[in-house]
Amino acid sequence: MAQKPSIPKGTRDFTPSEIAKRNYIFDTIKKNFQTYGFQPIETPSFENSETLLGKYGEEGDRLIFKILNSGDFISKVDDVTYSSKNSTSIAPKITEKALRYDLTVPFARYVVMHQNELDFPFKRYQIQPVWRADRPQKGRFREFFQCDADVVGSDSLLQEVELIQLYDGVFSDLKLEGATIKMNNRKILAGIAEVIGAKHLLIDFTVALDKLDKIGEDGVKKEMLAKGISEEAIEKAAPLFEPQGSNVDQLNRLDNLLKDSEEGQKGLEELRFIMETISTLGLQSAKLAIDVTLARGLNYYTGAIFEVSAPEGVAMGSIGGGGRYDDLTGIFGLKDVSGVGISFGLDRIYLVLEELNLFPEAVDKSLDVLCLNFGTKEALVSLKLVTELRKRGVMSDLYPSDVKIQKQFKYANNRKVPYVILLGAEELENNSFVVKYMESGDQISYSLSEVDKFVATLE
């Protein structure tokens, strides 16, 4: 009995229509990347394990797909290590490579390795798949594309302003109005951890806080307690759990909360500059909002952090995110190179556009013209006609088999072909072809020498 085929959980096959819609999003994002002066790069789908491990925090490390060494890798594990059944100690001996978890750390590695070839500030974009051993659910997959734009070699806050504009430009082109770009600053979070007496537990504090929208206030407080953050410290952080109010309200509240933290005040100053600059420049369709609970669980962020939520009423996780990292390249030996970047969540953006019916009607059109097949002689002339149409950039095809015309028309309908060409014995004798306009049902006859006249009606 043949084995029933399947694919791994968290992965997907894509239909031609889905590919067309995904390419529409890719093309829109890529066009904006290029408009803003970003240059493309690509990196391998897998990296050395040491490049990735330890860069995303404890939780991130658990989600990295490791690749087993080739050959008899088990024989290289000594008996003591093997009998311990400790995956942490066994893993380094049987796996030296891993699928990339994101595009940011590989980009940092790329910058260090190619630093003498790059002009700084270096603006790069990258559109490639990444892999995470996450629990699959709506909008969350184990294999998915990231679309990143980063600038390294500049600590100017104007880069953050530009990235917010870039988000806004993409969403406007996609007609996705009402997306909210939420922003915070890791220095503000560090300042809050300092004033509540939990500076030494900053990572635990931010990782727990970042889960507020997933596990609620009680869940966050419970996790903080479990990580060793005192009840007194959590009580001092109470303003973070209150209704946030307007951007101005939050800036004022943060000013009061962080008055005794130099680092917190620095973060607040950066946040205020970005907010005021964007307010002056204006946005086309997106909204910019301060979210003091936004933490972004990744360890490498040091300044501004971003997360984008779908328009109100759409039940979807974040559709983008990013932030400032002051020394990410330092982990690979290149110190004091500041960078900032954002990522677009293609798969979630796709689901949002689909839910809101925002894909253009013609986005998945794969064929403009189909020539029906009436027999060998007619097919040869039809193929010549199709060739002429293709030379003129018209997506054209000839039905390959001489089968019932009803079946050929059904094929055209299923492919949503707007124009069907009939070139039978009568047309062959008259050196003509008939175009049936499928939407209206009208039929117009053209001479075989009038290909350009027909093509003109398509424009």
Image (tube, grey):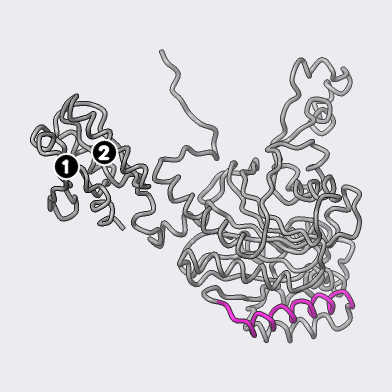
Mark positioned earlier in the residue sequence (2 or 1): 2
Q: Which residues are magenta?
A: 262-283
Question: Quick one: SS at disc 1?
Answer: strand
The prevailing secondary structure element of the residues shown in magenta is helix
Identify the residue shown where x is 76% and y is 81%.
254
Residue 15, quarter of the rendered image: top left
Q: Position of residue 9 (x, y in %)?
A: 54, 36
The quarter of the picture where the C terminus appears is: bottom left
The residue that label 2 is drawn on is 385
Residue 394 location (% of width, % of height): 34, 47
Point 79% across, 67% down: residue? 303
From the viewer's perspective, is 167 left or right of 73? left
In the picture, measured across the screen, residue 375 lies left or right of residue 164, that is: left
Q: Is residue 193 above or below residue 242?
A: above
Query: Is there any visible trace of residue 452 in the rendered image?
Result: yes
Identify the amino acid type marked 1.
Answer: Phe
Q: Which mark is residue 433?
A: 1
Name the residue: 70% across, 55% down: 124
Marking on residue 167: none
Q: Is residue 412 left or right of residue 210?
A: left
Q: Where residue 309 appears, x then y in whole percent?
A: 56, 65
Q: Where is residue 16, by image quadrant?
A: top left
Residue at 83%, 80% (x, y): give it: 258
Q: Quadrant of the N terminus?
A: top left
Residue type at numbered disc 2:
Leu
Q: Is residue 264 magenta?
A: yes
Q: Residues within 10 Å of mark 2 (few under 14, many from 20)?
A: many
Q: How many marks?
A: 2
